[in-house]
Image (cartoon, rainbow, N blue to C red):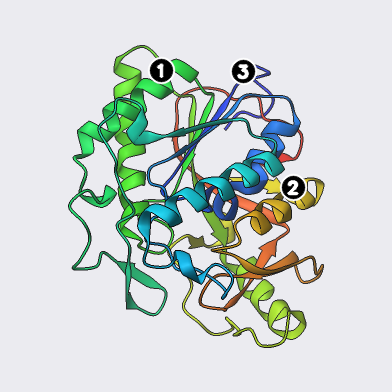
Amino acid sequence: MTDGAGPPDGGLLAVHAHPDDETLSTGALLATWARAGRAVTVVTCTRGERGEVIGRRLARLSGDPDALAAHRAGELAGALEALGVSDHVTLDEVAGDGPWVDSGMVWADVGRAAIPQDAPQAAFARVDLDLAADRLARLVCDRRPSVVVTYEPDGGYGHPDHVHAHAVTMRAVQLAAERGWQVPCVLWAALDADQLVSGREWCARTATPGLVAAVGRPLPSAAVAPAEVAVRVAVAPVLERVLGAMRAHATQVQAVEALEGEGCLGCYALSDAVVQPVPAQECYRVGSQNGPVGWPDGVRVR
């Protein structure tokens, strides 16, 4: 990879399955890009209609897909504002093919998700690959980003919408190249496995009482050996933006705290109440490299 070369103000386009994924998987990268004054586009493939809802105050939204979708749209707007991102697109609105909805998930194993038997017909995981990729390729050709970022092939932990979003993104990048815009670099969100393990141990000792420790649990598919990480984003300079974005997703994220130590800068939990670290470095693998990228301050490439 080439550091400091290429267009100095190239844009970033992030593709995610649901509201909250943009923050949990790529929040520091988005905030770093936006802080540098560069164009950032966030694409969500669904509105998170089947997400679990945290807390009694918002429990009325559970089981009401339309109400939850509308509420999570507001949460997403708040999170993007915290990150400094103003350009958001819901993928099914590109050509009016939707609505494409949250497929939902079941746990097939510890830390491993799968598509549920009752996934609706309009579930994003069931949407034709080339149809969705064509819509995304239109956006890529319009925004002409220097970097496109999404999940790794297994979707981070196997969520069917994440897996499909990865496939759609990679196909869209191919289509965009055929139509005149070859994306210089595609990144896949990753976790440094060593950093994750030490961070989980730290959070288990210091986080809010009542949460469930993640120590000893299987690592998600996004976790890789440190040598496999190609891009690292410093979280500290944008920590308040990232934590603010996490707090905006109140139906999905709880117990957000700044707690520095052991390679992490904070802790949080999802609806399962399992405490996870906010790493000091947000990590990525390279999905494809077709040209130089001018990286903003705070991004280190190998």
Task: Determine which residue is flagged by label 2.
Answer: 241
Q: Dot 1: few (<14), some (14–19), or many (≥20) neighbours within 10 Å?
A: some
Task: Determine which residue is flagged by label 3.
Answer: 6
Task: Determine which residue is flagged by label 1.
Answer: 141
Left or right of residue 202, residue 78 in this image: left
Q: Nearer the viewer, mark 2 or mark 1?
A: 2
Secondary structure at badge 3 equals: loop
> Splitting the image into 4 quarters, where does residue 95 fall?
top left
Q: Amino acid at mark 3?
A: Gly
Q: Dot 3: few (<14), some (14–19), or many (≥20) neighbours within 10 Å?
A: some
Left or right of residue 231, residue 135 in this image: left
Tell me whether circle 2 and circle 1 mark residues in contact (CB < 8 Å): no
Secondary structure at badge 2 equals: helix
Q: Amino acid at mark 2?
A: Arg
Above or below — where is 139 with respect to 33?
Answer: above
Q: Quadrant of the C terminus?
A: top right
From the viewer's side, name the closer residue of 222 and 110.
110
Left or right of residue 198, residue 102 in this image: left
The residue lying furthest to the top in this view is 180
Above or below — where is 283 with respect to 55?
Answer: above
